[in-house]
Amino acid sequence: MERYKARLVVKDYSQKHEIDYDEGFSIVTRLEIIRLIISNTAQYRWRIYQKDINSAFLNGFLEEEVYIEKPMGYEVKGYEDKVLKLNKALCGLKQALRNWYSRIDGYFLENRFVKRRHEYAIYVKIKESGDTVIVCLYVNDLIVTANNPKMFEDFK
């Protein structure tokens, strides 16, 4: 074994609604919409790209204070009776996905993407030239398609 890998995960079963978090949800695009995007991509010969965001839940900023117990084996002399305050979301938090969605939603809106009114997980950017990029969110996955290869590569 060359290297050990570990992930710190929160015990979400110990979180209490309206005490530890207000809301949690999953960003899911309806399957019909995904099929429609793939169908249009094939029909118009656009490029398509699927990306899994590995650390998506670690990229959300917490809006509330969250404390966790120290993991077993983590000891700092003089601080044995202390807990840890999280600065960013961790996997397992009920609000981690909501915080991730808030952050990526902000990114898309800052970069002039328009969120679809009836599909909150679909973002579209259309330039005056007609060049179009469509991004579909599904939990921590992205499906991206574009009619201009340059816009497609710039987004990636």
Image (cartoon, rainbow, N blue to C red):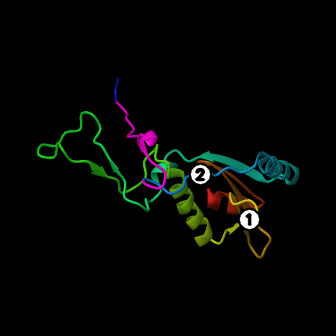
Image point 18% across, 44% down: which residue?
A: 81
Circle 2 Cα neighbour tier, 10 Å, few/some/many (<14 / 14–19 / ≥20): few
Image point 85% across, 53% down: which residue?
A: 40
Q: Is residue 78 above or below residue 135?
A: above
Q: Main secondary structure of the magenta part?
A: loop
User: Residue 5 colored magenta?
Assistant: yes
Image point 41% across, 40% down: which residue?
A: 11
Corner quadrant of residue 149 = bottom right
- The label on residue 8 is none
- Identify the residue under disc 1: 116
Q: Position of residue 7 (x, y in %)?
A: 39, 38
**SS of the residue at dot 2?**
loop
- Identify the residue under disc 2: 25
Quick one: quadrant of the N terminus? Answer: top left
Q: Position of residue 90 (x, y in %)?
A: 42, 48
Corner quadrant of residue 64 = bottom left
| Amino acid type indicated by mark 1 | Arg
Q: Pick out the residue farthest to the bottom.
A: 128
Q: Pick out the residue farthest to the top.
A: 1
Residue 100 is left or right of residue 45, and the answer is left
**SS of the residue at dot 1?**
loop
Q: Is residue 127 above or below residue 79?
A: below
Q: Which residues are magenta?
A: 4-19
Quick one: quadrant of the C terminus? Answer: bottom right
C-alpha gap between disc 1 and disc 2: 18 Å
- Are circles 1 and 2 on residues that touch, CB within 8 Å? no
User: Residue 67 colored magenta?
Assistant: no
